[in-house]
Amino acid sequence: MGKKLELAIAVLNGAVGDHLARTGNGLATEMTLVRGGEGLALERDALAAALPSATSRVVVLVHGLMCTEDVWTHEGGADFGTLLARDLGFSPLYVRYNSGLPIMENGAALAKLLSRLVSVYPAPIEEIVLIGFSMGGLVIRSACHAARQERSHDWLPLVGRAIYVGTPHRGAPLERVGRFVAKILRAVDDPYTRLVAQLADLRSCGVKDLGDARVTLDDPRHPVPLLPEIDHFLVAGSLATDVRLAWVFGDAMVPIPSATDGTCVDAATFALPPDHVKIIKGASHMDLPRDPAVYAHVRAWCGKTEEGA
Amino acid sequence: MKAMKRLRGLRALVEDIVEHGSKSVEEVHKATAARTFDVLEAIPPIATPAKVVHVVHDASVTSVYTMIRVVNKVVGKTLEVAIDVAEAVKDETPKS
């Protein structure tokens, strides 16, 4: 019941979370770090008690739109975080947030949260790995951008790797289609179609931001560049076996060119090494955060330094 | 504490939905009726009575939807008080 209730509230937050936050509604989720389903108090003593075996390598997992941290959980109860803890000695932490808020607001909040985490973490941190699923990847990009702009966050130099799983770096076409349909409905001079358009417009700022992968206020049509000091790794899903269909539909939510930030489309702008971009065949969008093939890549990328690969 | 906060949130959300939903449906109701009245008001012999009926119609529609919103507010406030009482009782009940 607890997980189902949290999921229902997460869906509600994703749909109208900006309204909930603006009206001070108690159903609005505040950004918190979570472990074992419980929010962590970011105080030195409380965190030390909650993380008795905290290690110097921290992995922070950020869920996507209308999800909770449960989206990472496999059928057996394990998830990318616990597997990285077992295999590579990482300390996993999960972010829970209101995915209906504008992505840049969640990015700024994540930057502050990580800053606070670094200041109270019970062990010296050597490295932070950020893993984002879907919208979570854009929140990570926005947080890194915010941290660099403010120059006051001490966590950014600790981030060695950022892994984006099914993240629509170049926007989500489904949202753009919804926006277009709503615009047409609004233009029709009929009270009923206008009512439907009003209902369509109720979708949250977070959903609207996904259309163009808007992570800052600067330029809604072009996301911030990937920070060069961080190693970036991208995972895309592909459901169709036909190459052209796979390219257009990707994992049924995010097309491959968007999930790979265009690196597989235009060789001239190929900013990442080929082994930093993986396309998982037969995986739908919601399969990606719990897919063993995705974890195999995540593990390999996270283990690179220590294994000297 | 968290459960009560969420319960209050749910109450407020339902109140918001009824408030905004009734306003939207009221607009649709009036706009739909206006199409018929526009035709009737364009016919000279019945234009004047049609305008009177239009005004009366819109006034009655407004009063009905306003009443829905008033009842919604009253129910919302009542529930808020009920939640306050439940919370106070819960706080006072000694834990065994």
Image (cartoon, rainbow, N blue to C red):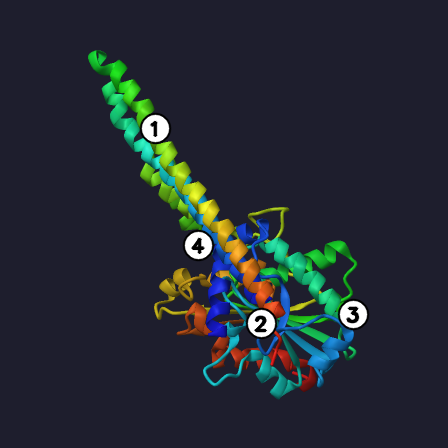
Do callouts 3 and 2 mark residues in contact (Cβ within 8 Å)? no
Residue at mark 2: chain: A
**Residue B60 percent location from the top left of the image:** 34, 30
Q: Where is A187 relative to A153, above or below? A: above
Against B75, residue A286 (above or below) is below
Residue where numbered disc 3 is placed: A119
Q: In the current view of this chain or complex, which residue is farthest to the top? A: B44
Q: Amino acid at mark 2?
A: His
Q: Residues within 10 Å of mark 2 (few under 14, many from 20)?
A: some
Task: State the CA–CA distance, disc 4 to disc 1.
Answer: 42 Å
Relative horizontal placement of residue B57, taking residue A9 as reference (left or right): left
Q: Chain of mark 1?
A: B
Give the amino acid type for the residue marked by disc 4 in the picture.
Pro
Real-space CA distance between mark 2 and mark 1, rounded to the nearest whole angstrom: 64 Å
Residues at marks 4 and 3, CA–CA distance in whole angstroms: 39 Å
- From the top left corner, tell me how far across and down residue A135 is, in percent: 54, 61
Between label 4 and label 3, give the one nearer the viewer.
3
Residue drawn at point x = 57 percent, y = 74 percent:
A275
Q: Earlier in the sequence, mark 4 or mark 3?
A: 3
Which quadrant would residue A188 be assigned to in this image?
A: top left
* Image-based side of A15 in relation to A106, left or right: left
**Residue pointed to by mark 4:** A173
Indicate the secondary structure of the residue bearing disc 1: helix
Q: Position of residue A1 (x, y in %)?
A: 46, 74
Answer yes or no: are tags 1 and 3 on the same subunit. no
> Mark 1 — residue?
B58
Give the spatial CA distance, label 3 vs label 2. Answer: 31 Å
Secondary structure category for the residue under label 3: helix
Q: Chain of mark 4?
A: A
Where residue A89 sits, quadrant-wise, is bottom right
Q: Residue A146 or B20: which is nearer the viewer?
A: B20
